[in-house]
Image (tube, rainbow, N blue to C red):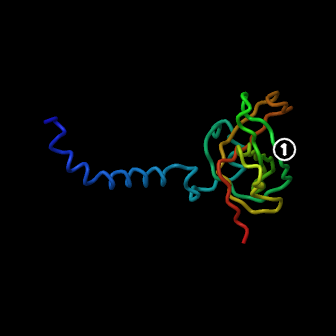
Amino acid sequence: MSRFGDHMGFLKRIGGLATLTILSTVGVLHPVMSMAADVTQIRDILSAASSYQLKQVAVEGTVQNLQEIPAQVKDVRGMCVSYHGYTCTLVDQTGEMEIYNPGVCFDPGGVVEIKDGDHVRINAKVQLLHAGEYGKDRATVRGIVADVVRLNP
C-alpha cells in the first residue's frame, strides 16, 4: 500500500469540501471577481501613476465622451473579431481618466454595456502610457476594463 493509501478514504470524504474552500477563497481574494473592492479615487491614481502601473483598481464615476470602437480583427491569424470596444472618460469628484475597453470576440449581436451619463464602478488595470507611445503627445494614464457595473437606479 502506498504511503498515502491510508489517507485516501479521508481525502475522498473531504475532497468536495476542500475544493469548495479553495474556490471560495479565490473568489473572495481575486479583484476581478469581487466588485466589493475598495474604490480608488482618480486623483490618487493620477498623482502616483507609476506605483499603480499594471495594478487592478476599482474606480467609480460618471461616463463621459463614450466612443464605440468599430469591430476589428484582434488576432494576427484573423481568429478574433472584437466587438463592442469603447473609450470614454470616467469622472469622479477628484478628477478624470481615460477608460479603454478592447471589446469581446465573437459577439456581433451584443451592445456596449454603458452610455454617457451612467454612474459606474469599473475594475480596471492601470496603464501608464509615456509620451510617444500609441501616438500620445504627453504621458497618459488609462484604465483597461476588466469588469463594469452600472450603478444607476
Horizontal side of residue 129 vs 123, given as left or right: right
Residue drawn 77% across the image and 46% down it: 83
What is the crowding at mark 1: few (fewer than 14 residues within 10 Å), some, or many (at least 20)? few
The percent position of residue 42, horizontal first and vertical second, equals 71, 50
The percent position of residue 132, horizontal first and vertical second, equals 82, 27
Q: Mark 1 falls on what kind of element?
A: loop
Q: Is residue 122 above or below residue 130?
A: below
97 and 79: which one is in front? 79
Horizontal side of residue 149 vs 68, given as left or right: left
Horizontal side of residue 13 vs 139, given as left or right: left
Residue drawn 17% across the image and 40% down it: 5
Q: Is residue 93 visible?
A: no
87 and 43: which one is in front? 87
Please tell me how many numbered marks the rendered image carries.
1
136 and 104: which one is in front? 104
- Residue furthest bottom in the image: 153
The quadrant holding residue 110 is: bottom right
Residue drawn 83% across the image and 44% down it: 69
Residue receiving disc 1: 70
Amino acid, disc 1 = Pro
Q: Is residue 153 above or below residue 3?
A: below
Q: Which quadrant of the figure contains the C terminus?
A: bottom right
